[in-house]
Amino acid sequence: MSKSTQQIFLDKPPSTTEIILLKIGKFLLWFGFYVLSTIAFLYTGTARTIIATLKQSPVISADLGKITINTRYVPAYIEIDAEEYGKTPQSELEILAGNHLLTLTPAYFSAFLTPLNLPVVVSPNLHTVVQAENGTNFYSSSFFVVYSIPSKGEGLVVYTIPVNAQIYLNKEYKGNSPYIGLKIAPGSYTLKITAVGYESQSLPISVTENYTTVVVVKMYRKLVP
């Protein structure tokens, strides 16, 4: 490659897709390490060390954002970065914007239900929404996290467990997860996610001008196929 060709390559601006992927990459990597650490705990007992590592060096800004946290069926005690915030449900708590570790510990039936540790992102002046259901272990638990990140234009990213779930936006089929939708007009939408063997989920979401809405979902497996 000639020097001039190298210079052209280096000066090439990243595409909108690349910018979005870079912005959500850190969160998804953090989330992926959490999933792997849970599996390690179930099979090797080493997850506590990995999760403790995840708690180090959080990215925090001086701006405030809001987070709403709810749990299905059983209330849970809320800790954000080891600081207590009462029990679910909690609506529009104001916390510092940045990456945080949310811990939800069942207030009842704690001998049977496992706590959940969820990485969450809170953006300045915007609203993050979390809903979870504590199960007897990670595999029987379910949750969704919805947040926004700055971007050029507007978009929607959906990441699911299991992968390859069907994504519908206002009843229109958009593709399978992981899904990256660009040029989504600002406004309110109903996001529906379906997968064989799992309960369908419908979520109200908002797309804000110059932000990409990110949705992370672990679906609840049906007890009866």
Image (spheres, rainbow, N blue to C red):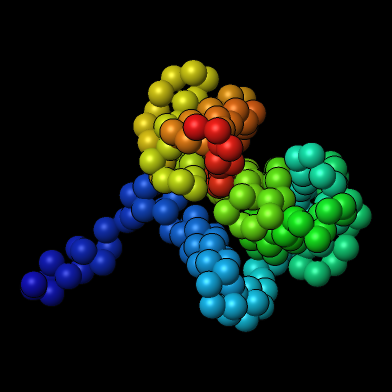
Q: Is residue 131 left or right of residue 74?
A: left
Q: Residue at x 80, y 61 (%)?
A: 111
Q: With respect to residue 47, does 125 lie above or below? A: above
Q: Nearer the viewer, residue 79 or 98?
A: 79
| Picture quadrant where residue 121 is located | bottom right
Confirm whether residue 122 shows in the render. no
| Picture quadrant where residue 80 is located | bottom right
* Residue 98 x, y percent position in the rendering: 67, 61
Q: Residue at x 68, y 62 (%)?
A: 117
Confirm whether residue 112 shows in the render. yes
* Residue 182 x, y percent position in the rendering: 41, 36
Q: Nearer the viewer, residue 57 or 224?
A: 224
Q: Nearer the viewer, residue 152 or 70?
A: 70
Q: Residue at x 71, y 46 (%)?
A: 133
Q: With respect to residue 172, does 134 lie above or below? A: below
* Residue 207 x, y percent position in the rendering: 58, 33
Q: Is residue 173 left or right of residue 70?
A: left
Q: Residue at x 40, y 28 (%)?
A: 174
The quarter in which the N terminus is drawn is: bottom left
